[in-house]
Image (spheres, helix red, strand yellow):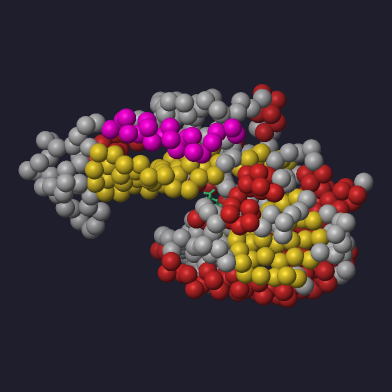
Amino acid sequence: MEQLKSYLEEHKERFLNELLDLLRIPSVSADSAYKEDVLKTADFIKNKLIAAGAENVEVCPTDGYPIVYGDKIIDASLPTVLVYGHYDVQPPDPMDLWESGPFEPVIKKTERHPEGAIYARGACDDKGQAYMHVKAFENMLANDALPCNIKFMIEGEEEVGSENLGPFLKANADRLSCDVILISDTSMIANDVPSITTGLRGLSYVEVEVTGPNRDLHSGTYGGGVGNPVNILAKMIASLHDDDNHITIPGFYDDVEVVSEAERKAMNEAPFSVDEYKEHLDINDIHGEKGYTTLERTSIRPTLDVNGMWGGYIGEGAKTVLPSKAYAKISMRLVPNQHSDKITELFQKHFESLAPKSVKVKVTPHHGGEPVVTPTEGIEYQAAEKAYEATFGKTPIPQRAGGSIPIVALFEEVLGVKTVMMGFGLNSDAIHSPNEHYGLFNYYKGIETIPYFYKYYTELAKS
Ligand code: BES
Ligand code: MN
Ligand code: MN
């Protein structure tokens, strides 16, 4: 392992420059204007996998953006680790809030990243984290230190719901057969408080449209006599939470797993400061479901949030109008044992029932995903734990995340394997937000820690 450390030290600058090149390609999967760039990014990953020594490297077409596959099978009798990541990124908007170009990476020092952080869309989510795996692989191979087989599957549609990945898994179950899935696409508590992500929330995402009169009306001539869809939508949305911030959709909580008092106690022992949280977000108070802490509200409890809402006149100045239509995009984060299809259905039924007769309501489901909890007993967790101990000198804390990676539930369902999530980002890294960044410490520490996972996993699998 000493050799790996000196190789990393020696090639540090190149490892960084390659990531910066990757970050310069605007691989925004949600916006078709970036199509060529998304495809270019797949090629970039392919070439880097080949350069690192991977075999059978292929840009596999799907009905959407391609999946980059590559492997290195050194001995069929050894365990196989499948690395999953994504090369697509979220749209950079709102552009005017970026301090530097989202696709012109720059390195700046911050309070949480005194050694510097890379500012760019995708720096943390997930190009920076996925690329650590390519570099850790290069390092292991160059130093004759790859202890087991490895497969890479890096997709380009995670940020838009991974709709083509499920069918790809099913069609390629043999090629993708493995003993464990390894993902770096989540966060850890702090640079001196390593943690392993042991859960993800599921997701049900819907769009609603409320229609009032058949055209926009003069808000003086008609105002007061016709239902205003924006007013009505606001009222309907407000009614989805009660005064304790519980969600009011009938049946919404029916399947929610009750987490034991012991587990809740343990999860609240993780270092967390409400004051720092408020300060970091510049909010005067926190908010959430009565009876739960912030850590619980953002991991083991389901949520309902408006992601966007529009209708009527939103241009400069004032226009007096009673709009014909109002819209909102709403996400619900789900926890075990809720099911996204069932929740979407409950939402639809309830939302339609809320509408007064003066408007019509249409609910359109978008993508969904199921929640997951990964075990802390298996050898994959133990191997990850030992890896952090080796490089951070501390035992990592297991922590369930609030975000979603919909494909993880399918890994278990289709491939029958467990996932281990070694995320190296910080919650404060502003993923999906302007000025996303990723610490240089985190990037290099990830590259250093990953090979230990392979080492311990292989050892534990043999014993
Ligand atoms: N990497 C994130 C998910 C994440 C972030 C999990 C931080 C845990 C901690 C992923 O790229 C993501 O953004 N997922 C989306 C869901 C997807 C269907 C658009 C999400 O969680 O909103
Ligand atoms: Mn991600
Ligand atoms: Mn994301």
Residue 75: x %, y % from top left: 87, 62
> Which residue lies at the image location 53% right of the left edge and 69% below the top edge?
38
Which quadrant: the N terminus? bottom right
The segment highlighted magenta reads 336-355
Counting from the top left corner in percent of width and height, residue 366 is at 44, 48
Q: 107 or 398: nearer the eye?
A: 398
Q: How many marks?
A: 0
Asked if residue 365 is positioned above or below residue 348 in the image, the reply reads below
Task: Judge whether 230 appears above or below 241 on screen.
Answer: below
Q: Using the image as rendered, state which of residue 14 and residue 81 is in the foreground.
A: 81
What residue is rendered at 76% in x and 39% in y?
376
337 in the magenta segment: yes
Observer able to see residue 254: yes
The prevailing secondary structure element of the residues shown in magenta is: helix
Most distant residue in the left direction: 221
Magenta stretch contains residue 78: no
- Relative placement, left or right, of 226 versus 200 is left
Residue 418 image position (x, y, % from top left): 72, 45
Would residue 392 be visible to someone looking at this image?
no
Given the current orientation, which residue lies at the most extreme right position?
A: 463
Horizontal side of 389 relative to 93 (left or right) equals right
Q: Residue at x 54, y 44 (%)?
A: 369
Residue 61 percent location from the top left of the image: 57, 67
**Left or right of 201: which side holds 144?**
right
Tell me what residue is drawn at x 16 percent, y 46 percent: 214
